[in-house]
Image: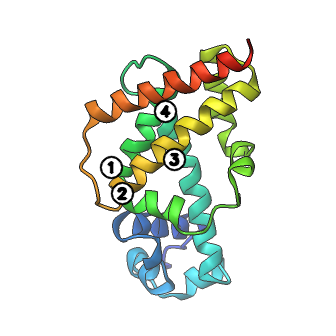
Amino acid sequence: MPPKPKITKDMVIDAAFEIAREAGGENINARTVAKKLNCSTQPVMYHFATIEELKQAVYTKLDRYHTEYLMNIQKPQQGVMPGIGLNYIRFAVEEPNLFRFLFQSGFAVENNLLEMIDSEELVPVISAMQGAMGLSMEQTKKVFLTIALFAHGYASIIANNSLEYDEALIKSHLEQAYRGALLAVQEETK
């Protein structure tokens, strides 16, 4: 009789990620992951002492996935930031369960905006913006915060089924917010 396939830690994380995508992070537990992997709960609990540890591992994977998603700007925009902002909102439209797990589950390490803006995960996003806008890092972060808060508001409302996605309207609002934030930063340096 051939040996049973070994369930790896990555397989457990991937299965839990898919559960978060399909049904929401609150549905990640040993039974649902085991069912997804077609195994007992033993391999799940072997790799993770608690379900909270597994959820944190899924959160970390999701955070990387989200950053890659943001940086894949589909259509040319007036600037990098509106493109990233639109992708942020598109993510909430296309992956509402993942969006809610990432931003509304309490698993974020950062406790406030200042910690978030300086997080390692945002370095690629902020760096891309800084290069495209030609601003100082401090100015870039100010513009980012304005657009991030604006985009997050739209994305949260959409992910929670309280607003229809209208890309043209949202794109117009994002570009207005971006121009306003950029103008405010430029006026501060005069």
Give whichever of discs 2 and 1 has the lower sequence position.
1
Element carrying mark 3: helix
Which amino acid, by three-letter code, is at mark 4?
Ile
* Residue ID at (43%, 67%): 20
The quarter of the picture where residue 49 lies is bottom right
Foreground disc of the pair 3, 1: 1
* Residue ID at (50%, 21%): 179
CB atoms at circles 3 and 1 under 8 Å apart?
Answer: no
Residue sitting nearer the eye, 9 or 69: 69
Where is mark 4, residue-wise? 84
Where is mark 1, residue-wise? 93
Up-down relation of residue 33 to residue 107 (above or below): below
Foreground disc of the pair 4, 3: 4
Where is mark 3, residue-wise? 66
Where is mark 2, residue-wise? 159
Element carrying mark 4: helix
The crowd level at tag 4 (other Cα within 10 Å; few <14, some 14-19, many 20+) is: many
